[in-house]
Image (cartoon, coloured by chain):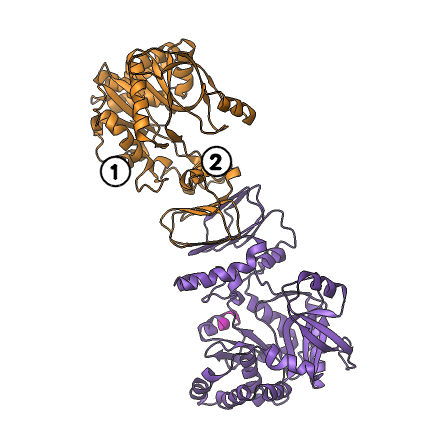
Chain colours: A orange, B purple
Amino acid sequence: MAEPIDDFFAVIPAGGIGSRLWPLSRAESPKFLHDLTGSGVSLLRTTWDRLLPLTGSENIGVVTGRAHGAAVEESLPDIAAANVFIELSQKDSAAAIGLAAAILHRRNPDVIIGSFAADHVIKRQRVFEFTVRQAVAAAREGYIATIGIQPSEPAVGFGYIKTGEELVIDDAPLAALVERFVEKPDLETARAYFADRSYLWNAGMFISRADVLLDELAANEPELHAGLIEIAAAWDTDRRDEVAERVWPSLKKIAIDYAIAEPAADKGLLAVIPGQFDWDDVGDFASLWKLIADGRRGKVTVLGKNENVLDDEASALVVSQTDRVVALIGVENVIVVDTPDALLVTTPEHAQRVKGAVSSLHDRGRDSVL
Amino acid sequence: MAEPIDDFFAVIPAGGIGSRLWPLSRAESPKFLHDLTGSGVSLLRTTWDRLLPLTGSENIGVVTGRAHGAAVEESLPDIAAANVFIELSQKDSAAAIGLAAAILHRRNPDVIIGSFAADHVIKRQRVFEFTVRQAVAAAREGYIATIGIQPSEPAVGFGYIKTGEELVIDDAPLAALVERFVEKPDLETARAYFADRSYLWNAGMFISRADVLLDELAANEPELHAGLIEIAAAWDTDRRDEVAERVWPSLKKIAIDYAIAEPAADKGLLAVIPGQFDWDDVGDFASLWKLIADGRRGKVTVLGKNENVLDDEASALVVSQTDRVVALIGVENVIVVDTPDALLVTTPEHAQRVKGAVSSLHDRGRDSVL
């Protein structure tokens, strides 16, 4: 078995609720704390388990909100307390990952950090490890490396990475420069991308030396950078709370894609490693159904322990969070999500619109179920 | 306002659960105890209110099971205790109505009884009363009278009555003989019946002198008749329980249609009065939806107090028995029945199959939700 990678630290931002998976995912019980695959453990825990061989347990951290600190520690009993980075409020990915980078750089100036979403599903562990090791090798050379997923279909739900010139980096045989990032395409464009093997899905994974990342942030978002450096300087002292409470609220909300990745790509500083592993962001109930039914939808698939699901000529995904009887008679292609205080009935084609229902409920003052 | 009809007594058999309306209707909470129209009171209570002008409150009785005696008295606070006829076990309609007929005949040898289901919906009260008064007039002449509903569509879900020769009866201008009863037809046959105005829906309402009814029962089902006479003789004495417990379990289970109505039709003893009022047996959720949405299905109709139903491009009937949020996104033509311990999702086209789900749950030992 391979050793953990020297100076490599994995940061897991665990901030998003996953509103498109409401009422399963909600503020008090976000997507990353759920077992969406029937594995018996949370997505966060599978993310930890996936990274552990690459880092060792001392070198994995989680950036999360105050509300979820305890749940994160419960889900990850081996995490070091010093590696749970609590955000005072949600500030998007540049601040979340930048904070971890600034703190970790103070702790170890040679650290290479990789950021990996807390709530994605990845299969083919050995291929994943092989890919991350290449990304770290590219990062050691001073690149900001990302992992682009080899598309398995012409998806319109993801952004794409157009790979450019090959890079010659020891231990990173598949590395190439990123030519540019592309927004979510329409179907026709997605089909063209799918036919052209140089377009990869942007899975939002970044691997970089912390100093390189912080330099890029300083160049593009100097105020955000300065704020994070100030908080990081106080973080491992008794002034953490005082400084964080003063500085954090003023920080800019911006995604790492805009604050760092796209400008770096323009400078020829962004490398991509194509990932040949299976990856799914489980963005809505349609993709959840596909994932757990292995693509076969012509029957009833149950996520949950409920043995009281009864069907008669039905095809459905049933997410059962109660022990109620759920009877489905003659309904085709529906998604039923049954929780103690909220019920959702939708279809795969409309699954993206669940987020809108969450907004409507918020507008109605029904935040207790959100 | 018209007076109650002399010697007329309305019997309401309240025995059926209404399994096709599960999980709303169930053993502990049968269909007749529900408010299916949003009127604010149970179907049983609306049945009482509809009959009251024809009978007065002393002349309405209910035949029901032991489990529902208390609920019946609660739903009908004006009912006389002596008019609640408790069946020791379910024995189908001939025994239920025959028992009431035998008891009431002992109390008043001139009584004319009418049997009216506890769980149907009728609109146009004045037309209903006009029709029943004619049926009573025919019954006074010695006929067993039934009310046939003028079809409003070529329904395949009901049996039909073929009207025959007109009868000349004072106070029953629309009375005719029943030529024969017809089983539920296929659609083509139903269309032919609908075009031919002499076919009426069999709504299972029978109006007859008690002595005539009992004589017919004696002729066709002598053992059942003898048993009922024996129980009736003891009913208003302190021997009621002893005799009922001995005799009732041995009685034959048979519908009044076969035990009395069809043989009476063959003898030219059965009269029919066409009813021009709106009638619905609310046999399943498809007819419930139609009833409460007034035929318009292109939106979301909610039965229940739930103001937390949220829809986005959906058409559905939502029967809400909880205060849970129910969100419907992009689902067309579905029926969602949300109760504390069971959830049903089906379509109007499959609503008749709900009864099968009830059987399956019984087979699985899940009687607690039935």
The percent position of residue B160, horizontal first and vertical second, equals 68, 70
Q: Main secondary structure of the magenta part?
A: helix
- Segment tinted magenta in the rendering: B72-76
Q: Is residue B210 left or right of residue A133?
A: right
| Residue at image point 51% right, 82% down | B252
- Amino acid, disc 1: Glu
Neighbours of disc 2 within 10 Å: few (<14), some (14-19), many (20+): some
Q: CA distance from mark 2 to mark 1?
A: 28 Å
Q: Quadrant of the N terminus of chain B?
A: bottom right
Residue B22 visible from this viewpoint: no
Q: Quadrant of the C terminus of chain B?
A: bottom left
Q: Is residue B162 left or right of residue B98?
A: right
Compared to residue B73, the image places residue A331 above or below, namely above
Name the residue tied to disc 2: A355
The numbered mark 2 sits on a residue in which chain?
A: A
Residue A74 is marked as 1
Compared to residue B339, the image places residue A143 above or below, namely above
| Residue at image point 46% right, 40% down | A365
Residue A335 is marked as none
Residue B242 visible from this viewpoint: yes
Where is residue B8, by image quadrant?
bottom right
| Residue at image point 46% right, 51% down | B323
